[in-house]
Amino acid sequence: KMEEGSLRCDLNISIAPIPGASTSISIGDSVVGVDTDNPFQSYLPPGTGNRVEVKNLNSIKQVIASAEYEAIRQAKSFMEGIPTTRETRTFDPLTGDTVTIRSKEGAVDYRFMPEPDIPPIVLNEEMLDGKSLERYLADALPELPEAATLRLMKQYNIAEDIALVITSDPPALPMYELAVNTALQAIEGLIPSSLPENSGNIEENRQKIPIMCANWLCNDLFGLVKKSATKSKSNQQNDIVQYDISMDNSPDDLIHPISVQYSPVNGKQLGLLISLILEGTVSTTVGKKILGVMFQEESSHELNPRNIAEERGWKMISDPLELRKICEGVILAVQHESQLEQYKKGGKNVWKMKKFFIGKAMKESKGNAHPEILKDTIQTVLEEAAPDVDT
């Protein structure tokens, strides 16, 4: 009973001479026989005798022991010029030997026969579109996972573990490549002078795109798919999706398989989202919010990440003048006079109060301020408000 961990198998064993040895085997007056009825004989060198079947092995240990014993026994027979006969043997676990239980006179005893429901298929050039069989199969078959993994690692310079995640889910591969191409087209279509300060140049962003798309697909999007597959319907209230993390995620408990095939977000949308982050239009944190919106909204395939950011006021604030206005409002506010005085005392208060003002300014911007530009602007305004402080 396999469901109980039991094993029962039959083992067919034959030996072959060392490659390079003579294919005409004769010892004294004896010639080693050839198993002419063996359908696999064409794959073996002549002079190897007949295959031997060992029945009813019930452990991996017995499979190994019987294979080793038969290899030695058949090799000894071969060296003595005695061909192995068609026979079925059994393995004795006490002695470690195999013992004959019956002989078989011909291939019919092995039940080798054509499948009556599958007629022979004769391939011709017309059926193969004038191609060789190898070329036809190469063109017709999809890319195999192992080849796809190696290609992704070489072409996109992504880590093996990430590539394996992508190729383990067939729909994820075209989605990933669509996301990369979409992001590349979006970045290349930008005018460099229109990019926000500190957003990085176009060439740097192009190099980041394959890895960012892979990480967002394998971590964020697959995470949302997994949550939707294990979603507890009883916890959906007021259009807020809640997930029952106590579920064991066994296949029987899944609403659908964990595959991006069930993702309402497509590769083009993912690529556009990555380009928004790289160009500095939205932060990574906001990007995750946008991905969540697209995943939960109906007709999400029609949603554009840029439109979501604009409609919800999530676009990153990168304008230095606007950020300076926010920073001045926070630092010079009456309610923050005591914090500014602590900053002016210098020492350990400088770093502590600077961190305080950055947090307040980020809150004032509703989390949309560009972190690097905000940090530099806070420093500038503090230096103007307290020029004598040694930072």
Image (spheres, rainbow, N blue to C red):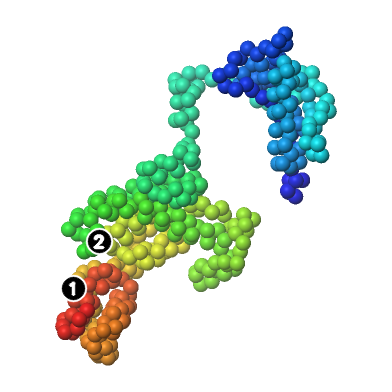
Q: Position of residue 204 (x, y in %)?
A: 26, 53
The residue at 72%/37% (across/down) is: 65
Q: Position of residue 48 (x, y in %)?
A: 67, 19
Residue in front for this viewpoint, 28 or 78: 28
The residue where tag 1 is placed is 321
Circle 2 sits in a helix, a strand or a loop, which is it? loop
Residue 320 visible in rendering: yes
Residue type, mark 2 in image: Ser
Instruction: Say left or right for 38 vs 218.
Output: right
The N terminus - image quarter: top right
The residue where tag 2 is placed is 199
The residue at 48%/18% (across/down) is: 125
Spatial CA span between label 2 and label 1:
17 Å
Q: Position of residue 270 (x, y in %)?
A: 38, 55
Q: Which of the marked residues, 2 or 1, is nearer the chain's N terminus?
A: 2
Residue type, mark 1 in image: Leu
The C terminus - image quarter: bottom left
Whether residue 208 is situated above or below residue 281 in the rendered picture: above
